[in-house]
Image (tube, grey):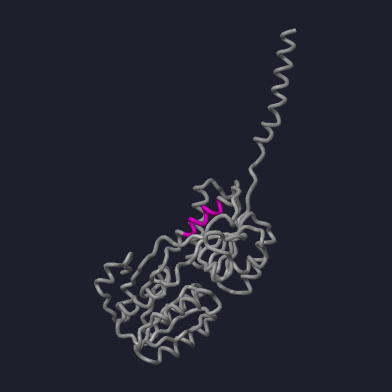
Amino acid sequence: MMRRRAFITLLGSAAAAWPLAARAQQPERVRLIGVLSVFAKDDPEATTREAAFQQTLADLGWTIGRNVRIDYRRTGGDTDSLRKYAAELVALAPDVILTHGSQAVGPVLQQTRTVPIVFVSVDPVGSGHVASLARPGGNATGFTQFEYRIAGKWLELLQEIAPSISQVAVIRDPRTGPGIAQFAVIQALAPVGLELFPANAISAGEIERGIATFARSPNGGLIVTSGGTAFHRNLIISLAARHRLPAVYPYRYYSTAGGLISYGPNTIEPVRRAAGYVDRILKGEKPADLPVQAPTKYELVINLKTARALGLEVPPTLLARADEVIE
């Protein structure tokens, strides 16, 4: 009798364990992340950002092919492509979408108010994408570009490295919040006697014509704002060199490409932090509850080779403040 009871108990325990074993053997659900970027397909900045994003995800336990898949779309700043790729990504029903650049998040929000969105390098309040930085309130959150007051710092740096300038062309995309606001800050802080000229960066042809016209007068310099200019950076840098115009740029990758001087936030740090937000969203948190965060690390980079080509003597005090000097 005891043997029979023991056998039945053993049989029951085994039967109860079978469903658990079957569940344990089932593969983990693969999550889908969509990425929409304003950068071009062959842009090294895009490659660097994507590598940092994937590495941080891996550090958090997300392995491509095992429990996550990433679908990338790069646009090169083309407005029609942004709308097209935003619709394509939303149609894939991803678990979350990451956007790079101030022009990328708007088209995605036009397509969905339910799919979670994490943005990088955006003016979210000025553009109307979130209710507030502390409580975004909708399906989007992420990381801002920087405070607009930094535009005044660009003007200071330009006057410090090229004190003879009497006129400044401000390269901006007037369709973006940063392009409008940063120019307004520079206008407010420009000293008496310094002439300012807005130069639109909507197309390559417009940039070439604008800089060529501006360069006809002597003692000029350039300030390149952050909104909508990144995908024209090689053109702007080459035009500045051709017309021998000292220029200040918003990000390090301008200086590494030959730009004279740059001051702005590190562009890789927020991508890593964005991966942390993506991780939290995939684990159940909502964008509405994740505060929009500002940059924490800024970099001053000086390209001495470009300074020499322009015949500029960089003040020792400026060199001493630089985070990086490119020989």
Residue lying at 70% horizontally and 13% vertically, measured from the top left: 6
The quadrant of the rendering that contains the C terminus is bottom left
Please identify the quarter of the rendering in which residue 255 is found: bottom left
- The image shows residue 160 at horizontal and vertical percentages of 30, 77
Taking the image as drawn, is residue 21 in sight? yes
Q: Is residue 15 above or below residue 112?
A: above
> The magenta stretch spans which residues?
270-279
Q: Is residue 118 above or below residue 151?
A: above
Taking the image as drawn, is residue 65 in sight? no
Residue lying at 24% horizontally and 72% vertically, measured from the top left: 316
Magenta stretch encompasses residue 320: no
- The image shows residue 13 at horizontal and vertical percentages of 69, 22
For this rendering, which residue is in front, 87 or 153? 153
The quadrant of the rendering that contains the N terminus is top right
For this orientation, the residue located farthest to the bottom is: 217
The prevailing secondary structure element of the residues shown in magenta is helix
Please identify the quarter of the rendering in which residue 27 is found: top right
Magenta stretch encompasses residue 275: yes
For this rendering, which residue is in front, 159 or 135? 135
Q: Is residue 254 above or below residue 30?
A: below
**In the image, is 34 to the left or to the right of 172?**
right
Residue lying at 59% horizontally and 47% vertically, measured from the top left: 283
